Image: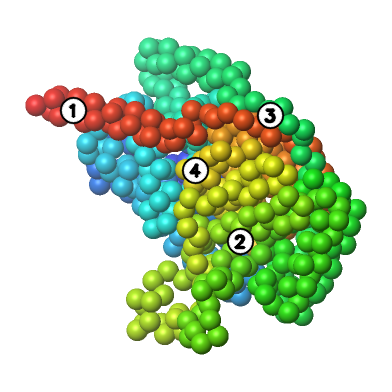
Amino acid sequence: MSNLPLFVAGVASLIAGAILPLAFAPYNLWLIAFISPALLYLLLNQRSPAQAFLLGEVYGFGLWAVGGFWLYTSIHEYGDTSAPLALLMIAGVALVMGLFNAIGAWFYRRFLPESPLTFAPLWIVIEWVKTWLFTGFPWLFVGYALISHGLDGYAPVAGVFAVSVIVVFIGCAFAELLRRRWFWLVPIIILIAVGIGLNQIRWTKPKASPVLSVSLIQGNIPQDLKWLTEYREKTLQIYAHLSKSEWGRDLIVWPESAIPMFQNEPEAAPFIEETHEIALAHHSAWVMGIPYLDLSNQTSTSTIDPPFYNAIGGLGDHGSGLYKKQRLVPFGEYIPFAGTLDWILPSLSKTGSFTAGPAGQAPLHVKGHALAAAICYEVAYPNLTRLNAQDSDFLVTLSNDAWFGTSAGPLQHLQMVQMRSKETGRWFIRATNTGVSAFINDQGEIVKRTPQFKTAVLRGNLPAMTGETPYMRWGDLPILLISALLMLIGLWTKLRYQR
């Protein structure tokens, strides 16, 4: 494809990026996960670094304009932003996120030889950077498309980045087969066979303890009503009514911010106490999402507003613990640079923001089991979930995906939860406001789920798991070191060839 005019190559690169989201839920055309990166690999062949930067930017723009379009629902419908401005904002996000691919493509053509052995490692380094740079936006990783499709056997060994690097490598190696370089067929066969073989290994096993009977309560509270003061009592009534038939089971789980007010407010405090007593009387543990106001250091004469958190609390019979969300959503849960930008936008300092919870929080405890917690899009961060999952029996995540309506966002989010289960070898309990609530087993398979936008109760009996996967022990370090080594060898080879 090096003979293509730059404009034609740009259009092809835009299309290649735009089709990659079709590999993920809800479309699940997973073969595109091999094809899309391979197309960019071919388009970069023999291009100058400047041309590669442009093609990478166009590819990334197509990827995020389509793959991140679920943001339109929250920006336009719930953010009261006009449609043209919402589209412009999504285009801005796509342009900025496209820079990751642009810089990666420039680096590839400037410093590395053209080979699947350098292109694939660079790809996952770019994915990894997206998990932490500017707090991270870890979405649309290639490896998610292969959950439950054989190559996810690499996930418990080295995480989603390992799956990504294998997928991108195989796609590029197939592109080399089109050039009749048949020796690339050998690593393709080996990697597929190893992935299938790894899927036969069970890194963790059920404990000897009895299974945990769990009920998930999906209230289906409309997003435009959820935070209205006049709808609070109705929200509490909905969850209380849906839970009536479930008391007596080991664990009842309510979703993120199911109690839409601070724990000390006049409507909340007696309701929480009453529900706690009901749970105790029926020998049930109760886990719920709630905005938590930290009054521990507050005095009657204090002039400083106490911090508040997006939290998960455990109460009821043998239920305890409090988890405070660590990774907050920019502009949704906090205002970035609010203090430093006061001179530009004074109103920012008057906008209340959640506080990020500390690292290393203890898990929740339910019926003698440890529940590692995550709130909403925290599960998109592989290493954060891995660290929280240490010494846990189950994973639990509470979310409210109503912000994203009928878009692909909630189902892409669910796919990430599946990958976190596969990586850690733990069952994931997922309770959401509008769906999808689900029980996901230690192999990343959805055992039971609710429909979206329906009031529902989901019941399941889950085994506690023991043991740890290699990924839980070593994290992303092995695959990042291997990738760095391959790129260094590639750099040395190119420099030697140029000499």
- Rendered-image quadrant of the N terminus: top left
Mark 4 vs 2, N-terminal side: 2
Q: Which mark is residue 207?
A: 3
> For the residue carrying disc 1, how many other residues have a C-alpha within 10 Å: few (<14), some (14-19), or many (20+)?
some
Q: Amino acid at mark 1?
A: Trp
Judge whether residue 37 can be spotted in this image: no
Q: Amino acid at mark 2?
A: Ala
**Numbered disc 1: secondary structure:** helix
Asked if the residue under mark 3 is in contact with the one under mark 4, i.e. CB atoms within 8 Å, the reply is no
Above-or-below relation of 295 to 285: below
In the displayed structure image, the side of residue 40 where residue 144 appears, left or right: right
Q: Which mark is residue 387?
A: 4
Q: Nearer the viewer, residue 138 or 441?
A: 441
Asked if the residue under mark 1 is in contact with the one under mark 4, i.e. CB atoms within 8 Å, the reply is no
CA gap, disc 2 and disc 3: 28 Å
- Rendered-image quadrant of the C terminus: top left
Mark 2 vs 1, N-terminal side: 2
Q: Which mark is residue 492?
A: 1
**Numbered disc 2: secondary structure:** strand
Above-or-below relation of 317 to 73: above
CA gap, disc 4 and disc 1: 35 Å
> Which callout, 2 or 3, points to the residue nearer the camera?
3
> For the residue carrying disc 4, how many other residues have a C-alpha within 10 Å: few (<14), some (14-19), or many (20+)?
some
